[in-house]
């Protein structure tokens, strides 16, 4: 059986490495898995203003599915997005939820409408755009910090 904490830590490392590789910025995992009141999310840029509060979820099965439309109170993806929104509000940042299931690519859900030819799905009742994470980073070139 896979330890969920180990899977989560591995997911955070993969997203950190993806962000570092595409941006050249020194992303790190949040110490104590977000338990610190002054530091929210799972991945951050130390000693910099973070424009995004980044949450990471890696699970066995896909939770981005038709249940988003029919199981509004019990769908796991909706709970993840709600958590991301809550953490982002506390951090004063934009929400970005990176997620993956076994043997899938990494996806990202975020609020800014893509403008540069990115393929995406819009979930209107959640107000989020979902796309492949590496394509979002490359095509949209989001600004992760102000300096």
Image (tube, rainbow, N blue to C red):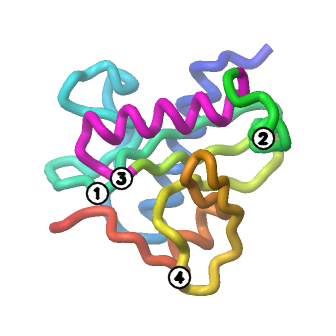
Q: Position of residue 38 (x, y in %)?
A: 18, 29
Kindly check if marks 1 and 3 are in contact, taking CB atoms under 8 A apart as contact: yes
Q: Residue at x 82, y 46 (%)?
A: 103
Residue 69 circle label: 2
Q: Disc 4 vs disc 2: Cβ atoms closer than 8 Å?
A: no
Q: CA distance from mark 3 to mark 4?
A: 17 Å
* Magenta residues, start to end: 74-94
Rate crowding at label 2 as few (under 14), some (14 to 19) or many (20 or more) other CA atoms within 10 Å. few
Residue 86 screen position, x and y as percent: 39, 32
Q: Which mark is residue 115?
A: 4
Q: Is residue 108 left or right of residue 38?
A: right
Identify the main secondary structure in magenta. Answer: helix
Within 10 angstroms of label 4, few (less than 14), some, or many (20 or more) residues? few
**Earlier along the polypeptide chain: callout 3 or callout 4?**
3
Q: Nearer the viewer, residue 129 or 142?
A: 129
**Mark drawn on residue 51:** 1
């Amino acid at each position: 059986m896979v330890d969920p904490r180990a899977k989560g830590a591995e997911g955070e490392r993969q997203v950190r490495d993806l962000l570092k590789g595409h941006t050249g910025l020194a992303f790190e995992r949040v110490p104590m898995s977000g338990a610190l009141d002054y530091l929210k999310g799972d991945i951050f840029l130390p000693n910099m203003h973070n424009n995004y509060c980044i949450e990471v979820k890696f699970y066995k099965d896909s939770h981005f599915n038709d249940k988003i439309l029919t199981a509004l109170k019990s769908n796991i993806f909706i709970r993840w997005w709600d958590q991301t929104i809550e953490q982002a509000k506390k951090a004063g940042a934009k929400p970005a939820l990176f997620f993956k299931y076994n043997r899938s690519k990494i996806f990202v859900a975020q609020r800014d409408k893509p403008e540069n030819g990115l393929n995406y799905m819009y979930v209107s009742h959640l107000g989020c755009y979902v796309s492949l994470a590496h394509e979002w980073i490359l095509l949209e070139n989001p600004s992760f910090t102000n300096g």
